[in-house]
Amino acid sequence: MPATLCYLSLSSNGLWGPLKWAPPLHLVYLNLSMNKFSGPLPNSLFRSSISSMYLQRNYFSGKVPPPPSSSLYESYGPGSTIDLGYNFLFGEIPDFLAGAETLFLNNNHFTGVVPKSYARNVFAGTTRTLFLQHNYIMSFPMEKSRETVLPDGVVLCLSYNCMVPPAVGITTCPANAGGSISRPSRQCSVFNGGNSMG
């Protein structure tokens, strides 16, 4: 592909197989959603120049790899959207995605504790949408010393995970997230069964 390519959308094309590709240097928008890509995500995708990335509804698996260099993701922030929803990604949620303004990690197999940087950005209003529903997350860091209120216009969804949900009114999930607040404990037992909001 030409090195000057800035915008690439190949959504809903039935593309399949592992993604072994280094995106062009100037790419800012990438949409590979609703295909049949599988295997691990290349770490070359996670650089700050790609501020809008849609990889949802594929068959990607494995852990989300860190970028090749810390300098590559410093500008995730205002206006950035990362959608990795509806895949088979697992492991702990990576720190380096916390700066995205809109982040979808829902409907995967993420485990562990959500990094504090995510909660800090949500309650500061710099992350406007954070979808973590339908994973196996054990804990989301909350301010226990005072009542926590989401800023206006911020959407946070934590439903159907392996944790006791936060106070009613803290999370705002879309209608298609389902009615169940927490996963059945038997599904969480492989992760030591710890149910907490930390």
Image (cartoon, rainbow, N blue to C red):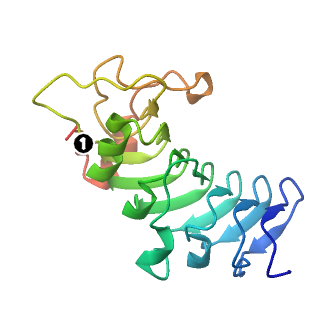
In the image shown, does 16 or 12 lie closer to the viewer? 12
Residue drawn 75% across and 54% down? 33
Residue drawn 28% across and 21% down? 167
Of helix, strand and loop, which one carries label 1? loop
Above or below, comparing residue 95 to residue 23 in the picture: above
Above or below, comparing residue 102 to residue 95 in the picture: above
Residue drawn 53% across and 51% down? 108
In the image shown, does 43 or 175 lie closer to the viewer? 43
Residue type, mark 1 in image: Pro
- Residue 63 appears in view: no
Q: Is residue 55 left or right of residue 165?
A: right
For the N terminus, give its image quadrant. Answer: bottom right
For the C terminus, give its image quadrant. Answer: top left
Disc 1: which residue: 141
Q: Is residue 1 left or right of residue 127?
A: right
Above or below, comparing residue 82 to residue 152 in the picture: below
Percent x, y for residue 84?
60, 54
Residue that lies at the very extreme toward the left in this rendered image? 145
Percent x, y for residue 107?
56, 45
Quadrant of the rendered image containing residue 187: top left
Residue drawn 29% across and 44% down? 120
Residue that lies at the very extreme toward the right in this rendered image? 13
Above or below, comparing residue 159 to residue 192 in the picture: above
